[in-house]
Image (cartoon, coloured by chain):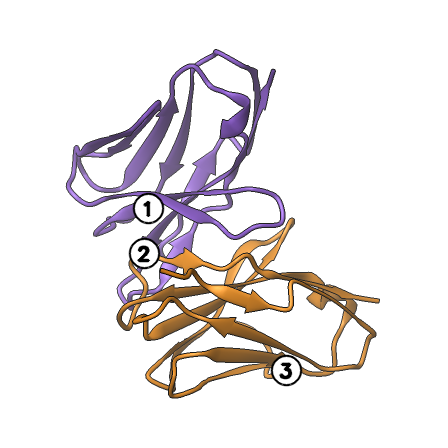
């Protein structure tokens, strides 16, 4: 069974600080996605990483896919209150159903 | 291009009742997946429909059912509601069968009292 473990579960930091959250598995994934979800809303796709070692940047957010395609990280530089939300990673299983991590709840304090 | 539309946004039902939720996918998307999200369990996959056929089903009791229409719109039904069914129900659409990237609606918040 493929599982995705996210860490930390919860992170609260001050505006302007940097942070990294992780998404780990013992299984290989063909791709991984990162989503951000705000309270009472559906998750919004941020990025998909496909190639081992791939790095993608979205403004202050940097996403990396591990060389072995078993893990991914999300780094936020100079966090802002608008970055607050639940960050979810997901990847397709062999039946092309998305497997989801439990998420990292991020709070950025002004 | 309109996004995924879920109706209603909020519902309050009594134990034992049944409920039907609706989802209209992005135009051109033929796959619709349903998820249940609760604080304790995270996102749990319910089922996926593609071309009016259930393609995959998660580990939920038979009280949870769904269907998809020829225009790709989908409905899910929960019968004999239990308190534990209180959750945010999310619908996601994608172009093809299988979900490699999901585009979600805003969800329906169901409260069972």
**Place of residue A20 in the rendered image (x, y in percent of width and height, measured from the top left):** 40, 23
Compared to residue A100, the image places residue B79 above or below, namely: below
Which of A92/B72 is in front?
B72
For chain B, what colour was chosen? orange
Q: Nearer the viewer, mark 3 or mark 2?
A: 2
How many C-alpha atoms fall within 10 Å of the one at disc 3: few (<14), some, or many (≥20)?
few
**Distance from the alpha carbon under mark 1 to that under mark 2:** 7 Å
User: Which chain contains the residue that carries disc 3?
Assistant: B
> Is residue A68 shown left or right of residue A87?
left
Label 2 marks which chain's residue? B
> Which chain is mark 1 on?
A
Q: Which residue is mark 3?
A: B63
Residue at 24 percent across and 49 percent down: it is A31
Task: Mark 3 vs mark 1: give the one in front.
Answer: 1
Q: Is A70 positioned to the left or the right of B41 in the image?
A: left
User: Element under label 1?
Assistant: strand
- B70 up-or-down from B87: above or below: below
Residue at image point 36% right, 24% down: A75
Write down the residue under mark 1. A33
Chain that appears purple: A
Residue density around tag 1, few if under 14, some if 14–19, many if 20 or more, within 10 Å: many
Instruction: Identify the mark at residue B101; answer none if there is no mark.
Output: 2
Chain-order first, disc 3 or disc 2:
3
Whether A50 is drawn above or below B103: the answer is: above
Q: Tell me the SS state at disc 3.
A: loop
Answer with the quarter of the image where residue B87 lies: bottom right
Distance of mark 3 from mark 1, alpha carbons? 31 Å
The answer to whether A57 appears left or right of A1 in the picture is left
Question: Residue B21 got which mark?
Answer: none
């Amino acid at each position: 069974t493929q599982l995705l473990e996210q860490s930390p579960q919860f992170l609260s930091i001050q505006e302007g600080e940097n942070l990294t959250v992780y998404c780990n598995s013992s299984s290989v994934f063909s791709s991984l996605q990162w989503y951000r979800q705000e309270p009472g809303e559906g998750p919004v796709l941020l990025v998909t990483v496909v190639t081992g070692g791939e790095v993608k940047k979205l403004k202050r957010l940097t996403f990396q896919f591990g060389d072995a395609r078993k893990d991914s990280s999300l780094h936020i530089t100079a966090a802002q209150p608008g970055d607050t939300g639940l960050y979810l990673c997901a990847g397709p299983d062999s039946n092309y159903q998305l497997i989801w991590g439990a998420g990292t709840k991020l709070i950025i304090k002004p | 291009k309109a996004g995924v539309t879920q109706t209603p946004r909020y519902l309050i039902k009594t134990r034992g009742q049944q409920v039907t939720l609706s989802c209209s996918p992005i135009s051109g998307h033929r796959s619709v997946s349903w998820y249940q999200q609760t604080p304790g369990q995270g996102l749990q996959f319910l089922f996926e429909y593609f071309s009016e056929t259930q393609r995959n089903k998660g580990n939920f009791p038979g009280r949870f059912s769904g269907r998809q229409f020829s225009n790709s719109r989908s409905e899910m039904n929960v019968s004999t509601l239990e308190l534990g069914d209180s959750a945010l129900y999310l619908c996601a659409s994608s172009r093809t069968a299988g979900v490699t990237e999901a585009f979600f609606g805003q969800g329906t918040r169901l409260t069972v009292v």
